Amino acid sequence: MSKATADSIDSFHRRMLRNAIDVRWPNKISNINLYEKTKQKPWSSVITKRRLRLYGHLLRLPEETPVRLSMKEYERPLKMARGGRKFTWKKNIENDLERIGVNKADVYDVAQDRKRWRLHIRSLEAD
């Protein structure tokens, strides 16, 4: 998801939280205090965490499953199309892996060890 999309999602979430705790203009509450008071996390970070958990599950599936076969086909190099590059699910995953410090070449090995994969995903919460 792009930065603009993440900001839009988080903005909507904060608006709903403010409505839930009945904080309206001219009263104000900072975003940090809002999240602490409601014991919530930004939806963009929840989406990222869940996307990485799903990706870990997909990587641990046997090689001959349809999902793994389609992932292998999707990663096959193709001739680049003209125009701007689309922001795809694969690009999202690559950005997320970079944020948690997992090398793209080592991702299959890291995902096989569930505890290690969970530690990497939990590192997102520190951000």
Image (tube, helix red, strand yellow):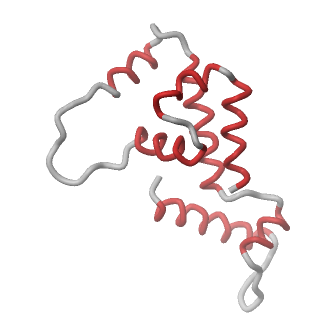
Please tell me which residue lies in front, 126 or 69. Answer: 126
Q: Residue at x 48, y 40 (%)?
A: 93
How far from the left and from the top, in percent, is residue 87? 36, 49
- In the picture as drawn, the residue positioned furthest to the bottom comes out as 26
Q: Residue at x 60, y 47 (%)?
A: 47
Q: Residue at x 47, y 52 (%)?
A: 1
How far from the left and from the top, in percent, is residue 64? 45, 7
Please tell me which residue lies in front, 82 or 43. Answer: 82
Tag count in the figure? 0
> To which quarter of the image does residue 30 belong?
bottom right
How far from the left and from the top, in percent, is residue 96? 53, 45
37 to the left or right of 29: right
How far from the left and from the top, in percent, is residue 78? 21, 31
5 to the left or right of 15: left
Quarter in which the C terminus is drawn: bottom right
> To which quarter of the image does residue 120 belong?
top right
Q: Residue at x 34, y 27 (%)?
A: 74
Please tell me which residue lies in front, 17 or 47. Answer: 47
Vertical order, 61 against 102 (above or below): above
- In the picture as drawn, the residue positioned furthest to the left comes out as 82
- In the picture as drawn, the residue positioned furthest to the top comes out as 64
